[in-house]
Amino acid sequence: YTQQALAWQKIVDGNPQDQWAWRNLFRAAYYSDQFNNEWGESQDESKTADIIKKMEETLPDSYVLNLCKARFCLSTDSAAMRGDNLYRAAELMPEDACAEDIQYLACRLWAINPECKLVGELLTKAYKKGYFPRRIMQYSWNILQSMEQDALFFCNGDVLTVPIKMQQEALGERMDVTIIPLSYLHVEEFREALFKRLGVKPLSLDVNDYGEYGYDWNKYYYTDVIMHIIRESNRPAYFSTDMLSWTNLDLNNLYNEGLVLKYSDKQYDNFAVAMNNVKNIYHLEY
């Protein structure tokens, strides 16, 4: 990434109005600083921050500047810290914007404003640009179709979360299912909107209370929030199959139904459900 940043800097120096060169320079510097731990105590003193400052001078209020601030903003930039740049980037988005950036903006907006119509519009654009290959979309369709009515689906990571959300927003599939990315449970706005939608009473949790668990504190936090949602909503709950590494859920209450794990505090014949999914629901031609 460091070498990429140096190479893209030369392109930017040769053509300061090339916004895509700025975008690539920013991304390379961002990852270089991240993986080399260059942000330290003050992100504002990093190479990434320097690029943002120079971009503000060269391409003020541009699509690419607002896009980059969605990933990294100066601590003195209160508007960017509120997320204002997300809406501005969507407003200024050119037709040749790449699908990766479009879905990234959609996901950021989804986290801070789940009811925002822009989320669906942006994910539809990314879908039409073919961001995910057909086999990934088909796999996510299988997951979505195998859940009960009004189900909750807890998942994490772009490749599991975004294609399923695209199925809903771009294709109108299974809008009854509530997709819950675990990392979004840290965002107060997302939690409040989720609880309101599900009719779940507020939950007062302080992440500082989980310090005793050290590096694994997230697992305990996620488990407490998940169980609160399941108990209060009284809806069928499903998990992506990698959830065992993200939570401390009781394994005796998780049943494999093929491509998902279902939570149940009572034993049932999950093998029969899995076989039905394979025979009657899943599309397996991929």
Image (cartoon, helix red, strand yellow):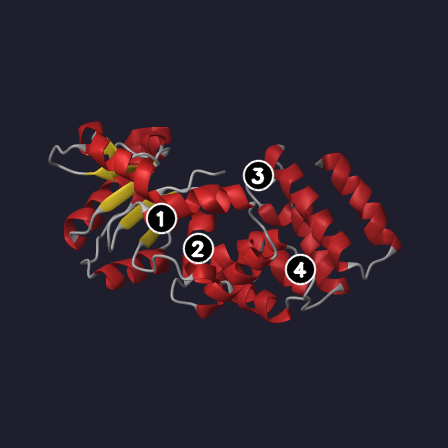
Residue located 24% across and 49% down the image = 148
Amino acid tagged 1: Leu
Question: Is the residue under label 1 in contact with that under label 2 (CB below 8 Å)?
Answer: yes
Of the two numbered discs 2 and 3 in the rendering, the one whose residue sits closer to the viewer: 2
Q: Which tag, 2 or 3, sits closer to the chain's start?
A: 3
The residue at which mark 4 appears reads as 97
* Badge 1 element: helix
Among the 4 quarters of the image, the one containing residue 113: bottom left
Task: Residue at the far bottom: name it.
Answer: 91
Q: Earlier in the sequence, mark 4 or mark 3?
A: 3
Say if 119 sits above or below 35 in the image. below
Which mark is drawn over residue 40? 3
Q: Identify the residue shown where x is 32% and y is 45%.
A: 154
Mark 3 vs mark 1: which is more N-terminal?
3
Label 4, label 3: how many angstroms apart (C-alpha)? Answer: 32 Å
Residue under the image location 82 percent in, 52 percent down: 12
Amino acid, disc 4: Ala
Is 229 located above or below residue 79 in the figure? above
Residue corresponding to mark 1? 144
Q: Is residue 286 above or below residue 141?
A: above
Q: Which residue is mark 2?
A: 167
Please state the horizontal and vertical placement of residue 253, each as a whole percent of the image: 18, 33
Q: Is 143 displayed left or right of 133 in the figure?
A: left
* Front position among marks 4 and 3: 4
**Residue type pointed to by label 3:** Gly
User: Are the residues flagged by discs 4 and 2 in contact, CB closer than 8 Å?
Assistant: no
Q: CA distance from mark 2 to mark 3?
A: 39 Å
